[in-house]
Amino acid sequence: MLRQSSLVVVANRLPLDDNVAPDGACEWRRSPGGLAGALHAILEQTPATWVGWAGGTGQARDLPDIGTLRLRPVPLSEEELRGYYEGFANSTLWPLYHDAVEQPVFDREWWLAYRAVNRRFAEAAAEVAEPGATVWVQDYHLQLVPQLLRELRPDVRIGFFLHVPFPPPELFMQLPRRVELLRGMLGADLVGFQRPQAAHNVAQLAAKLLGAHGADDAIILDDRVVRTGAFPVSIDVAEMRTLNARPYVVNQAHQLRHDLGAHKRVLLSVDRLDYTKGIEHRLTAYSELLRDGRIKVRDTVMVQVAVPSREQVESYRGLRDRIEREVGRINGEYGRVGEPAIHYLNQPFDRADLAALYQTADVMVVTPLRDGMNLVAKEFVAARRDDSGALVLSEFAGAAAELSDAFLVNPHDVDGLKETLLQALAAAPEDLATRMKAMRDHITSHDIHAWARAYLTALEQSQALVP
Ligand code: ADP
Ligand code: F6P
């Protein structure tokens, strides 16, 4: 029997463990990445259907519900996985949308796979949406889905949210399929971004490429009004506070502190192993501070968590090799027996262990070259049990617009980054407390629930405005 929902989320990945338990039960799996974390908080207790890829290739099997959430898997063949996910999504759009910090690759075969898979997602969403449902499509993997879905189901309300940056027009114009991609996304009733600049870029492109008119927050295209706006995504602050108070987390933080050296200053970074995260720039800055004798391994240590990501994509494999070589070099040159300069952890952590790490850090170093938001920065603030701790944050992360009390830095400027790290290490406790309180106040009032409310309310109102 076909089961339909009034709320349908469409996102590349389903949030489930690869291994379904022997009794057939499924559990949420918070795969590393901002999107899964953001939606976890909202959908945990809301009746809805999530349309997405269950991992792997071949036929999709039926999946049991996770609480009130139904799962509608979308199968991918091996060829589609390569063309759609590894290819067009992660080797064309991802680098291009992140300021082309890595060269985007344009391959005509990948586009065909991307279009075919987007159509399959749109068809699956059309099938499980009840009449008049709200369908919320997520991220750059599925940019054609809004328009395809509108053609299949004109009765549903369609939202699209882009978790990553939307590039400046001159970069977007490089895309061979720019018209289809723009039109696809503008098939939604409301298109949400992390930053207002993205909505401005899209309005300019819609005028130039599609002959649309209107304003940054309302694009008039053909006979429709497409609302656009900035809705900065956030984290589940309440979940983090509950974690903070768990005895396991408190004990684990004490243990980590003991293991790292009770007297040492701890610099921490937590990233997906991705070239947008500025890991190499950060290692250069840290290594030069050691070289210049401005910090010493006897009183400072760095912990770099870099969880494996998109390992089938060549540029990610190359990055991992370079990082691991550099960590080895730094430890070889500056470490002492039992006292490495850097602890490098290329592995996933569960939420409790991440919270303990955040609590242990003196300075959290978040230096992406470009990032839609960066939830790690917000998680660090939420994880602190007191007002201590410094956040060094790239100006090029979406989070910098909200966390302006962090030590903001341009990660391309290695000298500036070095000075900022020293400044954060030397900051007076009163200065840190003022900064931390302001950042905590902000994320408390702008948590993930506020984000979902703001977006879904705007989506509800947007369709009423369609002539
Ligand atoms: P992105 O979406 O580009 O990965 P974000 O900083 O917005 O970047 O989100 C990363 C998410 O992945 C955070 O919720 C963070 O806690 C999680 N994460 C990062 N590293 C790990 C890890 N080693 N194990 C588990 N989760 C991780
Ligand atoms: O936030 C950007 C994003 O692409 C998310 O859509 C995704 O959940 C995360 O990064 C991790 O990427 P992937 O699903 O490719 O492992």
Image (tube, grey):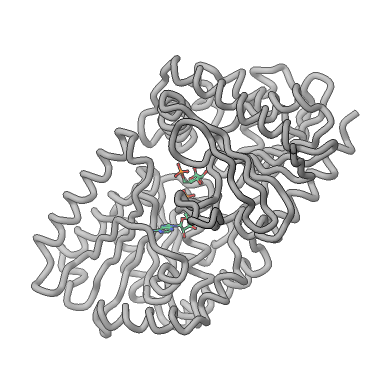
Left or right, residue 429 beside residue 74:
left
At a point 65% along the width and 19% down the height, the residue shown is 208
Q: Nearer the viewer, residue 278 or 49?
A: 49
Q: The N terminus appears in which quarter of the rendering?
A: top right
Pinpoint residue 399: horizontal percent, then vertical percent.
54, 56
91 versus 295 height, above or below: above
At a point 50% along the width and 81% down the height, the residue shown is 246
Residue 429 shows in the view: yes
Pinpoint residue 44: horizontal percent, then vertical percent.
65, 59
51 versus 78 height, above or below: below
Quarter location, residue 166: top right
Q: The C terminus appears in which quarter of the rendering?
A: top right
Pinpoint residue 110: horizontal percent, then vertical percent.
45, 21
Pinpoint residue 279: horizontal percent, then vertical percent.
32, 51
Residue 167 shows in the view: no
Quarter location, residue 201: top right
71 versus 104 height, above or below: below
At a point 23% along the width and 49% down the height, the residue shown is 323
Left or right, residue 169 beside residue 304:
right
At a point 36% along the width and 29% down the height, the residue shown is 103
